Amino acid sequence: AQTVTQSQPEMSVQEAETVTLSCTYDTSESNYYLFWYKQPPSRQMILVIRQEAYKQQNATENRFSVNFQKAAKSFSLKISDSQLGDTAMYFCAFMRETSGSRLTFGEGTQLTVNP
Amino acid sequence: DVKVTQSSRYLVKRTGEKVFLECVQDMDHENMFWYRQDPGLGLRLIYFSYDVKMKEKGDIPEGYSVSREKKERFSLILESASTNQTSMYLCASSPSDKLRTYEQYFGPGTRLTVT
């Protein structure tokens, strides 16, 4: 069974600064996908960024980028130039390639961006 | 835009009642999911469905059942609600694996309180 661990229940950052959220996972699979989802207060969960395990290049989406370390089974999310709208709960998630889109989520990290 | 809707944002039920949570998606997605979200535990998969009338157990199916009679609708049923089922329930949908997008689209959630 796969497990996903987010060891930081809460984090805070000043507006315009950079913050990194940590995620580790455990799997014996070689082909899989990793995701970061964002859940703003009282709003729907949305996908932030996706990484395919077979790709060595780290994914980026505007101010969001990941540091994917396959050997270490680590998948951190870096948010640059933090904005007040980045305040949300962030979930790391894992998907086996053959799982039929089934996700395993971490515990979540509550990020607060302070003005 | 993909839209996933859930029948209620807030619901209060009594112990022993039968509870129906409804989810509807408008993007013709094959896959649909029910999760419960609890603080410190992240999202845990209850049931999922990859086609009409098909269902598979997730990680915590005990005390729940599901129904998918139409492609766009996926219902979660609590046969006899108990206080330990007080939680946030999230529905999600995704296209089939052959499109290889793997993104799940989430509804706004139903906060269920069982007293």
Image (cartoon, rainbow, N blue to C red):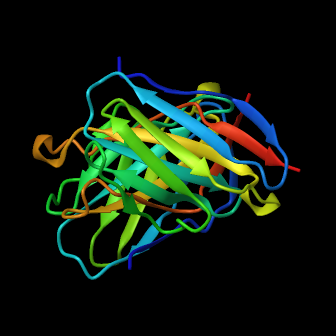
Above or below for A51 versus A112: below
Above or below for A12 versus A105: above
Above or below for B78 versus B104: below
Residue B68 position within the rendered picture, expressed as x and y whole percent measured from the top left = 38, 42
Residue in front for this viewpoint, A22 or A5: A5
Q: Relative to A31, is B103 on the left or the right?
A: right
Residue in front for this viewpoint, B49 or A81: B49
Res. A58 visible in picture:
yes
Residue B16 position within the rendered picture, expressed as x and y whole percent measured from the top left = 79, 55
Residue depicted at x 70% and y 55%:
A10
Q: Residue A26, located in which quarter of the rendered image?
A: bottom left
Question: What is the residue that sits farthest to the right in this orientation?
Answer: B115
Above or below for B60 versus A50: below
Q: Relative to B104, is B82 on the left or the right?
A: right
Res. A79 visible in picture:
no
Residue in front for this viewpoint, A93 or A69: A93
**Quadrant holding the N terminus of chain B:** top left
Q: Relative to A29, is B15 on the left or the right?
A: right
